[in-house]
Amino acid sequence: MFRFILLSLVLNYLVVGYELSSVDANVESRLAEAKARFKELQANIGREILNSPRTASNTNLRENKGPHLTASNIWLASYIATSPSTCGQSGAIYDVYGQPIPPACTPTGNANQWYKVIGCTNQGTSGVNIESQTYSDAGCTNEQGSEYTYFLQNCGDSSATVSYTCFNDNTNSAAPWAIPTQPSTPAGYLISQFSSTDTSCSGNPISYTVLVNGICMNEFEYACPEGKAYSSSTCSGTPYTFALNTGCMQSSSSGSDYNYQCYN
């Protein structure tokens, strides 16, 4: 009996130690996953832009949405649901990732041709349009041909769990991480990433992610100001409860600064 109790204590100690060491690793891995997903998205957008047919925009439509196309601060937010069947449902979002789309003048790979993103338009519940324009100069001042779009479809296939929203200076908030209303930014554990020179986390973040309260994912559940770690992927059983880090601090694995806070 004594050996059984001792073994139980040792196993419990190991589990708690594992969960403690996994807390920061879990946050870091979620950030890395989100960044990788956005880089892949950017690459896909670039390929679609270069390969898409150059169809002219409706002149009247362009006139109506003209101020939108001049937005200087365009953000694309991705909402990841727990399953394809719940994609697009605000109550099933377990992770939100937001990244700005800079209107950088980018070479297309063709001689004397550059392009930049000039807008992002929400298409109701179906998805978003990323709008781009080709130019004949490296400063992207001389338009070449007509503008064109790349459509990002919400919950686009049987395996998709992602829906999207555009934000910009002119048609809605340029600070989407500061909107605590579903489905824009659900309540949860907000992690804002800042440049390495913003050591006080006082400026605008360069990306953000929200680990949403009350949704089980990968053995973790968030209920700010606490997190819960389970030994079961379904978050069943008795969890190990831990206080979430808050405040501005430097990441242990990168030079960037992060601000951790509970967001309700």
Image (cartoon, grey):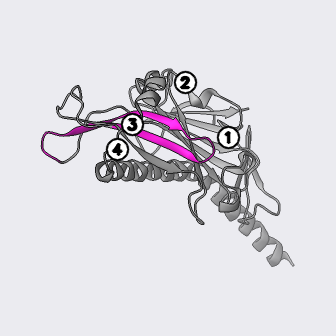
Which is in the foreground here, disc 4 or disc 2?
Answer: 4
Task: Answer whether residue 128 is magenta in the image.
Answer: yes
Q: Which residue in the structure is indicated by mark 3?
A: 57
Name the residue furthest right: 1
Residue at which label 2 appears: 171
Residue 244: mark: 1
Helix, strand or loop at label 4? It is loop
Amino acid type of the residue tagged 1 in the rendering: Leu
- Please provide percent x and percent y for residue 258: 51, 34
Q: Nearer the viewer, mark 1 or mark 3?
A: 3
Q: Give percent across and percent down for residue 220.
A: 69, 55
Dividing the picture into quadrants, the one containing residue 60 is top left
Secondary structure of the residue carrying tag 3 is: loop
* Label 2 vs label 3, nearer the camera: 3
Q: Amino acid at mark 4?
A: Thr
Kindly check if marks 4 and 3 are in contact, taking CB atoms under 8 A apart as contact: yes
Residue type beneath disc 3: Ser
> Answer yes or no: do the residues labelled 2 and 1 have beta carbons within 8 Å?
no
Write down the region rendered in magenta: 110-132
On residue 55, the disc is 4
Q: CA distance from mark 2 to mark 1?
A: 34 Å
Cα separation, mark 4 vs mark 2, equals 25 Å
Q: Amino acid at mark 2?
A: Thr
